[in-house]
Image (cartoon, rainbow, N blue to C red):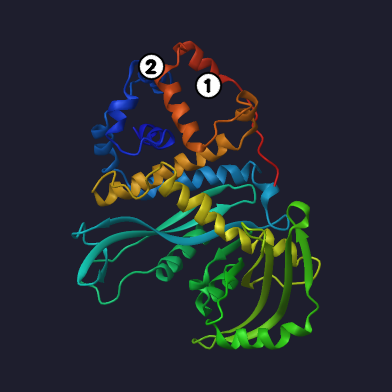
Amino acid sequence: MLWTGVWMFLCRLGARRQVHWLLRCPKGHALFHAMFGCGIPHGDALNNVVCRLGAPDVQECVTALVERLIDAKVLYPYRLRGRYFLIAVDGTGMLVYAKRHCPYCLTKTHNGKTLYYHHVLEAKLVCPNGFAFSVLSEFIENPSENVTKQDCELKAFYRLAQRLKKRFPRLPIALLFDGLFANGTVFHLCRKHHWGYFITLKDDQLVSVNEEFNALSPATAPRVYHTGKGDAITQRFRWVNDIEYVDTERRQHRLHVVECLQTKPDGNGEPQTTRFKWISAFPLSGDRVIELCNQGGRLRWKIENEGFNVQKNGGYNLEHAYTNNETGIKVYYFLLQIACILAQLIEKGDLLRHLFHKGFGSAKNFAFRLLEATRNASLTPQDYRALLDARIQIRFHPP
């Protein structure tokens, strides 16, 4: 049943009813018979099962997939400084309703109109080659209808941090945050759990830290780095270590701040400069600032591009209501994450490149070909069994 849901997302069908119209065919049934001893269930039967499952159990399946990749050292080449696994943390919207959907809905009123919505905070393991694997998800939801203060991303992160530390107590981790998380409690939690971090710092945040950085950074010799085709991109780094900061709870922190001014040609060939600034848990120096920023702080965007954007606009239809059941919504979300992990492993593996040298043109085209292979494959159950029993090795693009 669950594999039907995963296959629905892998083929990017976009809706549960498409299982009946596109997957349930003689060849599709033959494939499932070879793997599971039964045919493809109807979409309604799938939904009946999904809504009765425990969401934490399915979440554990997602986490266990990533844990298996870590244990098998598949992701070791993509670690920061050969040690830290990069996990980006950010929230995104899932569903929006014009009427209250359940007691846990978040609410927002604009121009006299109230919207009811569901958000989720994601912790995704990101890699320089484009991998973005969901590790843990924390749903942002109110405990009841009548609350004085709604749930939010920060509260959800405090819950997620406890789960992440419990699930991976000794894993070397560096967390990647946007500016929302630049506060003393986040600094304290990361130090308590021995996590590294990069947090985007805006000019209107942590005024004392920004003032000290602006006062001291001119005394630091900047590091200039040229990259891109023909060294067309220039990056100019400056940093200040050990800036003292006292938060509202009177906790003392020593922060390292780094700024990157990146200049590259725009569409018309004119130079355009973009500024990045991070708070770093790692002390900065001239021999490692480039790696820490480009292979660390900059990778936070992977959760937006390879993560949320692909899942919303790449055919997975993250914002589509596959069910209205509160538990079912979460289970479908986890099945989508499983499908995304598998799709990335397939698309970036060398096995696919060896079989299809010209590729497919796009990830959507690959999903279409996968659907058509399901519907038209002429292999016998014995052929399927031989494929399942074969031992293979798949390698991925180098970092």
Which residue in the structure is indicated by mark 2? 27
Q: Amino acid at mark 2?
A: Lys
Instruction: Using the rendered image of the protein, determine whether residue 231 is visible from the camera's viewpoint.
Output: yes
Give the residue at x 67% y 50%: 78
Horizontally, is 281 left or right of 284 in the view? Answer: left
Q: Residue drawn at (67%, 77%), measured in percent from left and top?
A: 256
| Residue picked out by circle 1 | 388
Dot 1 surroundings within 10 Å: few (below 14), some, or many (20 or more)?
A: few
Q: Secondary structure at mark 2?
A: helix
Residue 144: give its label.
none
Residue 81: quarter of image: bottom right
Across and down, in percent, residue 311 comes to 43, 47
Q: Residue at point 67% right, 53% down?
A: 79
Q: Is residue 169 among the parts visible in the rendering? A: no
- Measure the alpha-carbon separation of dots 2 and 1: 17 Å
Amino acid bearing label 1: Leu
Left or right of 397, for residue 40:
left
**In this rendering, is residue 308 above or below 242?**
above
Q: Position of residue 6 (x, y in %)?
A: 40, 36
User: Which residue: 50% across, 13% down?
Assistant: 383
Residue 379 position (above or below residue 253): above
Q: Residue furthest front?
A: 268
Q: Secondary structure at mark 1?
A: helix
* Horizontal relation, residue 267 to residue 364: left or right: right
